[in-house]
Image (cartoon, helix red, strand yellow):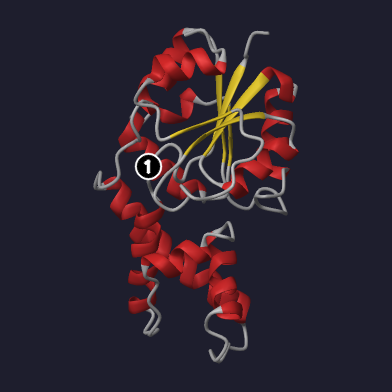
Amino acid sequence: MTIKAIIFDVDGTLADTEDAHRKSFNKAFAESNLDWHWDVPLYDKLLKVTGGKERIKYYVESFNTGFNKPADYDNFVKKLHAVKTVHYTAMMRAGDVPLRPGIKQLINDARKAGITLAIATTTTPENVGALLEVGLGKDWGSYFASVGCGDIVPKKKPAPDIFNWVLAELKLAPSDCIALEDSNNGLRSSLAAGLKTYVTVNQYTRAQDFSGAAAVFDDLSDLPAFYKTSGLGL
């Protein structure tokens, strides 16, 4: 079977961004006069929930239950997340977070071979653009036939909605594609959409359960091994 498309997650997959997110949240908290601080062990727990706004709410509900919620709580969370996004995109544009090993070469090899590329992520369009403009260039959008991100679907990972949305845009069957993910939530999402999925782990996801993955790699620094395992034939 010939693989027609690769669907990429972003955070932790295309780049090791999770700690940049954590630091950006902390900058937003300080700027908003909140005495919150997310250290690495806490953020590891918060990553159980996908989506930045959802993660803030999870923190308040499960780890900061004494917080006095403002009257318009949803708007408070939305504004706080917007401040965080400003800090995060600034870090990306400064080139503080490079693409992970092998990613740029994989993208270039796949494009030369006529394999369609797509993105399925819970992060915002601003975050995706800030990262890939530095990593791939200002024309990065032309690399991808579909970019599914942020709030364009009602349910975020581990629900399959974002992958189903991308598959519909590509007009391809799940069997024609493979997915690249880095977390248990992402894997559950892609598998629920019927996609054969390969995982590259990072410091936050290394110990997670990846049952059902086609293969698990530390990274893609050994692309020939990945090409052989995945059947890409590149």
- Residue on which disc 1 sits: 131
Q: Quadrant of residue 3?
A: top right
Name the one closer to the observer, 69 or 142. Answer: 69
Q: Where is residue 173 in the image (x, y as percent from the top left)?
A: 75, 22
Amino acid under disc 1? Leu
Residue 172 in view here: no
Name the spot of residue 136 as percent of width and height, x first: 35, 29
Q: Residue at x 36, y 25 (%)?
A: 104
129 and 97: which is toward the camera: 97
Residue 159 to residue 14: above or below: below
Considering depth in this image, is 18 or 75 the residue closer to the camera? 18
* Residue 3 in sight: yes
Residue 60 position by quadrant: bottom right
- On screen, residue 9 versus residue 42, left or right, reads right
Left or right side of 84 for 174? right
Name above or below for residue 163 compared with residue 83.
Answer: above
Camera-side residue: 105 or 203? 203
Q: In which quarter of the image is the N terminus?
A: top right
State the residue at coordinates (64%, 8%).
2
Is disc 1 surrounded by few (<14), some (14 to 19) or many (20+) residues within 10 Å? many
**Residue at 59 percent of width and 78 percent of height:** 62
Residue 190 percent across, percent down from the top left: 66, 37
Q: How many labels does the image show?
A: 1
SS under mark 1: helix
Q: Where is residue 227 in the image (x, y as percent from the top left)?
A: 48, 15
